Image (spheres, helix red, strand yellow):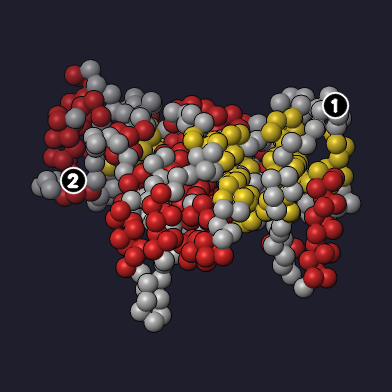
Amino acid sequence: MTRRERPLKTLGPLFADKYAFTMGQALFTLGTHNTRTAFNMFIRKNPFEGGYLLTGGLSDFLEWLSDWRVLDEDIDYLRSCKDGQGKPLYTEAFLTFLKEARLELDIKAMPEGTIAFPHEPIVRVEGPVWQCLAIESALLTFLNQGSLVATKASRVVFAADGDPVFEGGMRRAHSLGSLLASKMAYMAGCIGTSNMKAAQLYGIPDVGTFAHAFVMLHHSELEAFENYAKAMPHGATFLVDTYNTIEGVKKVIDVAQRLLVPNGHKLLGIRLDSGDLAHLSKKARKLLDAAGFTDTLIVASNDLTEYLILDLKKVQGARINSWLVGTNLVVSSDQPALGGVYKLAAVWEDSDVIRDVMKLSEDRIKISNPGVLNVARYYRPDGMFWKDMIVPEGTDLSAGTTSIDLVDDRKRTTFNTEVTYQLLLVPIMENGTQVYTVPVLKDSRTYALNQLAALDESHRRFANPHLYHVGLEADLHARKEALIDALKHAA
């Protein structure tokens, strides 16, 4: 194995919550472990009080799944697990079964970078129930973090309104999760990362200058700037706030005039990492422009969020034209977890009879949708997203159909035969074999940016975003309501 190969596949089947295996043992004992089932992964509400989710993490999940086999070392660990009386928790028959097992799953999913909305199945997993349960935790791990960071990054890029945004959050990220965060940030519109391993693995442009330590190593700030200009003239972006920001800018201008320009080099940029960013950027811009460095970038960092960027640009009139966003992007500090869930939706009674199942709740938002489902996205004539409809897999939509709003069933839309639509879940795995070619990251980035461009800005605004219409196909709505009534009476 070369270092360029990702280690995710080596995590193996035990990258799971314990209940996957205790339920597996129980179902094996009952003889129902191979019952065919369908599970849906979905969100109940958009993150950040926003209007959409940008999906991510599928590629890492598939890498983990690509060599899913229970090995001897896994069996040895499971054999060591004991129950409350100190007896083996798993039977030898079950362990033998696991050792010989191969994936038999069918998976459909929205491609990475697809815009999704609450209650829509993002991933649908079908197959033996024990296998559907065995992959649940890994699926949620990768897609919850990947989708959360991708959505956050898309918001930051939206706030920057065309300015370049760089991701620089490795030092604050959650361990190796920084690799997924860097990848998802790039997919969602950031143009580079400070994370060298992510740059190496995924072909993301790497960015970076120097830290305060470089300045502090020298006897003076001027000496530090001079030495950096001599040693790294082609990468001349200077951190100017170690001691006094405006004095730092003046020193950079002096160094650039003496050591860069005469030797054919450019002053690429300065970076502001503390203080009143709007005030300092305005003063810095005046100094740079007066010295003829009108193309020099002013890069800002320092705990930026999409809200702060928007305020700096639109309210404070900052002269910043490039943004380095770290902590609040890679850990989504205002919402550290997405809350995507994975719920059973259908059980095959035999090869021809499928029983709808659902989770009930006093809270209407937590009632899941039953059945083997897909999502139809309808488009306006100009190609923008119009409305989505959750449909039973195999529904003939060519003759038109009616959608009933998830939130208010009085709102109904009839789609005629001339409306353009697309089914969002595509085949990923068939009988345990991956049939989907994972796009290279640059292609996923292009796809994600096109998805974002097709979403009306009313759904992307931060304050009170317009609610995107998601409905249930009329027959599915009727089945759901009938099942709710039946389950309530049964309870």
- At 87% across and 48% down in the image, what residue appears? 411
- The reply to whether discs 2 and 1 touch (Cβ–Cβ < 8 Å) is no
Q: Is residue 49 visible?
A: no
Residue 234 is left or right of residue 126, and the answer is left
- Specify the farthest residue to the bottom: 85
Measuring from the top left, give residue 193's x and y in whole percent. 36, 38
How packed mark 2 is, by other alpha carbons closer than 10 Å (few <14, some 14-19, many 20 or more), is many
- At 47% across and 31% down in the image, what residue appears? 438
Measuring from the top left, give residue 202's x and y in whole percent. 36, 33
**Residue behind mark 1:** 417
Q: Quadrant of residue 387?
A: top right
Residue 414 is left or right of residue 277, and the answer is right
Q: Earlier in the sequence, mark 2 or mark 1?
A: 2
- Residue 164, relative to residue 325: is it above or below? above
**Residue behind mark 2:** 215
Residue 235 is left or right of residue 90, and the answer is left
- At 51% across and 52% down in the image, what residue appears? 131
Q: Is residue 293 visible?
A: yes
